[in-house]
Amino acid sequence: MKVLPIARILLVDSHMDRRLATKAALTALGVGSVREAAVLDEVTDPAILGSADVLVVQVDDPEDAPANPFRFGAGIPAVLIAEVPAQLLVRAASRAGYDAALGAPLTPRLLYRRIGSVMQRARRLARPAPAPATVGQPTADLVSAG
């Protein structure tokens, strides 16, 4: 995925060993940069939040997951990771405004791919929609098909 070598990831996890292991794994896979914090409140500085491309939050209990601060139009996707049954995780992630959820334990490659997919989805949603074709005028595909 082309976007990940330049991606700026904000990793939030209260467990330092797990956070450092995740950061090392993402860095080894070629992610641009990974900033880390124990809690989301540590990164309330708008400059730090504005310099992130993806938020990754890892928690023990998804019910305790902080709400995604980017959920209302900031355009920064967020991924929630927790070690609980998938159905509970998906519901909790949806309520807290996350774009994706992953069950733990997970392989670094899976996290890498999920980060890439949420970044691509966010970029697609940020692009302006193409203008609708005017009635009576053929589209380019119809013209070249003849």
Image: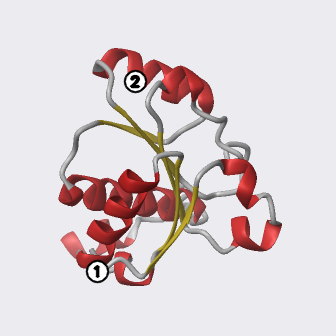
Q: Amino acid at mark 2?
A: Leu
Q: Residue at x 43, y 30 (%)?
A: 60
Is disc 1 placed on a helix, strand or loop? loop
Label 2 environment density (alpha carbons within 10 Å; few <14, some 14–19, many ≥20): many
Q: Is residue 59 left or right of residue 45?
A: left
Q: Is residue 12 left or right of residue 16?
A: right
Q: Residue at x 81, y 66 (%)?
A: 46
Q: Is residue 55 above or below residue 84?
A: below
Toward the viewer: 78 or 58?
58
CA gap, disc 1 and disc 2: 27 Å
Query: Which label's residue is closer to the chain start, 1 or 2?
Result: 1
Say the numbered circle drawn on residue 30: 1
Spot occupied by residue 63 in the image (x, y as percentages of width and height)? 54, 20
Toward the viewer: 107 or 74?
107
Q: Residue at x 41, y 24 (%)?
A: 90
Q: Which residue is mark 2?
A: 89
Q: Is residue 45 left or right of residue 98?
A: right
Spot occupied by residue 48 in the image (x, y as percentages of width and height)? 71, 71
Residue 62 visible within the image: yes
Q: Residue at x 48, y 61 (%)?
A: 124
Q: For residue 67, which quarter of the picture?
A: top right
Spot occupied by residue 142 in the image (x, y as percentages of width and height)? 30, 66
Is disc 2 placed on a helix, strand or loop? helix
Q: Is residue 66 left or right of residue 62?
A: right
Q: Residue furthest front?
A: 17
